[in-house]
Image: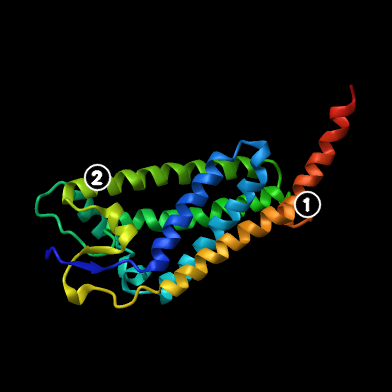
Amino acid sequence: MSEQKILVWDAPVRVFHLLLMLSFAGAWFTAELDGWRLTHISLGYTVAALVLFRLIWGVVGTRYARFSEFVPSPRSVVSDLGSLFSKGSEQRVGHSPAGAVAIVLLLALGLLVPLSGWAVLNEVATSWLEEVHELLGTGMGILVLAHIAGVLLASWLHRQNLVSAMVTGLKPGEPGQAIHRSWWTLAVVLLLAVLGFWSLQWRTAAQGGVIGPQQVLAAQQDDREPADNED
């Protein structure tokens, strides 16, 4: 393959990737911290919204962002894994079949984890659902770590920095394989929408206002107060 760098990943995909990584990591680390419960909830909602955006962009987005371009068949996944350590293994411009499987699973869990969390928050089902939510979150965390390990392994085997490629959008390829537009305006809109949502959550909480998560948090705090004052 040519060493010429071409544009492969558009800006919305790169911004989505960064925001999803930060949001899930933040939600993961605040899951068991009572004082950070609002942060956990807000980041969970952010993950769900980002995944919904990615699902839409996977249909109408640029070439390598579309599901039709990278969702693999079982045979191609087996073939890709079998040739992983082969010197003659194919280096794809877009996602590899194995990497595509990880992405599809991450998107699925990126919806199921926040959905189960919302159900727990609103007491839609009995307490068993909380265990399901934790199990799904753990599964997503393991999958994220496996995805990172796979990216690092593939980068080492193919002598190609896949992490840098997701940051810059550039990978080795032929000019005819490049996408022709970065879509930076849409990426900025996505970033501002997420930052705006986070700002709204913090300002509403600081002012004592009530929106979804805060109402539940206030009720939980009120329920604890009589027990705290019994002594």
Please tell me whether residue 129 is drawn above or below residue 183 in the rendered image. Answer: above
Is 29 located above or below residue 52 in the figure? above
Give 230 or 184, whichever is nearer the viewer: 184
Badge 2 amino acid: Leu
Please give the name of the residue rendered at 42% of the width and 74% of the height, measured from the top-left corner: 59
- Whole-percent x and y of residue 182? 35, 73
Picture coordinates of residue 86, whole percent (x, y)? 12, 49
Query: Mark 1 or mark 2, which has the lower sequence index?
Result: 2
> As drawn, is 192 to the left or to the right of 97?
right
Q: Nearer the viewer, residue 188 or 14?
A: 188
Q: Secondary structure at mark 1?
A: helix
Disc 1 crowd rating (10 Å Cα; few below 14, some 14-19, many 20+) is some
**Above-or-below relation of 197 to 83:** below
Name the quarter where the C terminus is drawn.
top right
Q: Residue at x 40, y 65 (%)?
A: 13
**Amino acid type of the residue tagged 1 in the rendering:** Gln
The reply to whether residue 83 is visible in this rendering is no
Could one spot residue 151 in this view of the protein? yes
Q: Residues within 10 Å of mark 2 (few under 14, many from 20)?
A: some
**In terms of secondary structure, where does tag 2 sit?**
helix
Residue under pointer 1: 215
Q: Is residue 203 left or right of residue 19?
A: right
**In the rendered view, how is the structure colored?**
rainbow
Tell me the quarter of the image containing the N terminus.
bottom left
Quarter residue 101 falls in: bottom left
44, 133: nearer the viewer? 44
How far across and down, in percent of the image, does residue 58 sit? 41, 70
**Label 2: which residue?**
153
Expressed as whole percent of the image width and height from the top left, the position of residue 66 reads 36, 71
Q: Quadrant of residue 187?
A: bottom left
- Drawn side of residue 69 relative to residue 44, left or right: left
